[in-house]
């Protein structure tokens, strides 16, 4: 705990921004929340929560591979996540076979990724602290370079999502009609999974690979419980994601609670309330 909060919101905000590490944490957290909130809405809309969960778990062996090979853990994380996304996307979603083909591919990739992660973890002879950081998050240790990389990745992913957003909604709600109208359904599905992989790669800094699933899925799930309108739901998912991250960082700053626990607890509590309405 750094300091005691007060009822003076301006004074508390000044405390949050007093240290450079918290400035970086809030900047990176905001960027991640924008990307995760927007991407997460489509994840829930398309029923791809299991795929998102798999991509989040693939981040662990990716980070472990980077550390084992004396490379950047973030580089290994991005490489493994994108490769897994391509593996799931290339298997495709057969319009006549439902989601069975994708589910089989996701399950196989998840099992293999966890096995590879265990292998890399057992081969690594150094300190496991860096690997644990990717499991549980290390947002309070984000550097200026990390903020820059996160900003570039989030900007590119959000730009791509803005370009494919409208046809992606059409292809998600009614893929048969979309394909009949000439919408490249399979190409959109593959592109979207790559965007999810990038979202996972940057969101890991906030809550780690074990908890990133909550940030990617819960805001979108809560938003869809609150409104059936896609435009409003997308905006609400993004706003909720921002509130979860900002509130979680604030709670963690003024208490001994971990950031990942604070973020996911707030997200889950909001989802429970949204379902109960």
Image (tube, grey):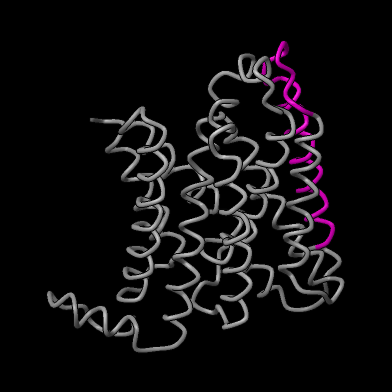
Q: Quadrant of residue 242?
A: bottom left
Is residue 62 depicted above or below 231 in this figure? below
As rendered, which of 90 and 277 lies closer to the eye? 90
As rendered, which of 225 and 276 lies closer to the eye? 225
Query: Is 52 included in the stretch rendered in magenta?
Result: no
Where is residue 172? Give x, y as percent: 57, 26
Q: Quadrant of residue 227?
A: top left
As rendered, which of 183 and 65 lies closer to the eye? 183
Rendered residue at 40%/37% (across/down):
231
User: Viewed as shown, does residue 20 lie left or right of 107?
Assistant: left
On the rendered image, what quadrant is the C terminus found in?
A: top left
Where is residue 59? Give x, y as percent: 70, 56
Where is residue 29? Give x, y as percent: 46, 66
* Extreme-front residue of the structure: 181
Rendered residue at 81%/43% (across/down):
112
Q: How many marks?
A: 0
Is residue 200 depicted above or below 106 in this figure? below
The dominant secondary structure in magenta is: helix
As rendered, which of 65 and 244 lies closer to the eye? 244
On the rendered image, what quadrant is the N terminus found in?
A: bottom left
User: Viewed as shown, does residue 115 lie left or right of 27?
Assistant: right
Where is residue 3? Give x, y as percent: 27, 84
Is residue 7 depicted above or below 135 in this figure? below
Q: What residue span does the magenta drawing correspond to?
A: 92-120
* Extreme-left residue of the structure: 7
Q: Quadrant of residue 75?
A: bottom right
* Extreme-bottom residue of the structure: 19
User: Viewed as shown, does residue 193 lie left or right of 124?
Assistant: left
Rendered residue at 74%/34% (across/down):
187
């Amino acid at each position: 705990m750094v300091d005691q909060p007060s009822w003076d919101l301006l004074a508390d905000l000044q405390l949050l921004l007093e240290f450079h590490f918290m400035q970086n944490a809030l900047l990176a957290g905001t960027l991640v929340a924008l990307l995760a909130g927007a991407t997460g809405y489509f994840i829930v809309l398309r029923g791809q929560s299991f795929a998102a969960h798999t991509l989040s778990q693939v981040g662990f062996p990716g980070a472990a591979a980077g550390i084992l090979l004396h490379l950047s853990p973030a580089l290994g994380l991005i490489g493994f996540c994108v490769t897994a996304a391509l593996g799931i996307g290339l298997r495709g979603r057969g319009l006549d076979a439902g989601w069975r083909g994708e589910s089989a591919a996701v399950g196989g990739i998840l099992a293999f990724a966890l096995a590879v992660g265990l292998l890399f973890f057992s081969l690594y002879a150094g300190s496991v602290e860096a690997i644990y950081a990717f499991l549980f998050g290390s947002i309070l240790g984000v550097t200026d370079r990390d903020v820059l990389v996160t900003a570039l990745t989030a900007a590119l992913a959000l730009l791509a999502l803005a370009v494919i957003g409208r046809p992606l909604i059409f292809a998600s709600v009614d893929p048969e009609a979309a394909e009949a109208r000439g919408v490249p359904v399979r190409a959109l599905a593959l592109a979207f999974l790559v965007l999810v992989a990038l979202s996972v790669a940057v969101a890991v800094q906030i809550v780690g690979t074990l908890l990133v699933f909550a940030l990617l899925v819960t805001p979108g799930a809560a938003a869809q419980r609150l409104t059936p309108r896609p435009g409003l739901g997308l905006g609400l998912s993004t706003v909720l994601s921002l509130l979860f991250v900002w509130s979680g960082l604030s709670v963690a700053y003024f208490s001994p609670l971990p950031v990942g626990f604070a973020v996911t607890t707030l997200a889950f509590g909001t989802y429970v309330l949204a379902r109960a309405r």
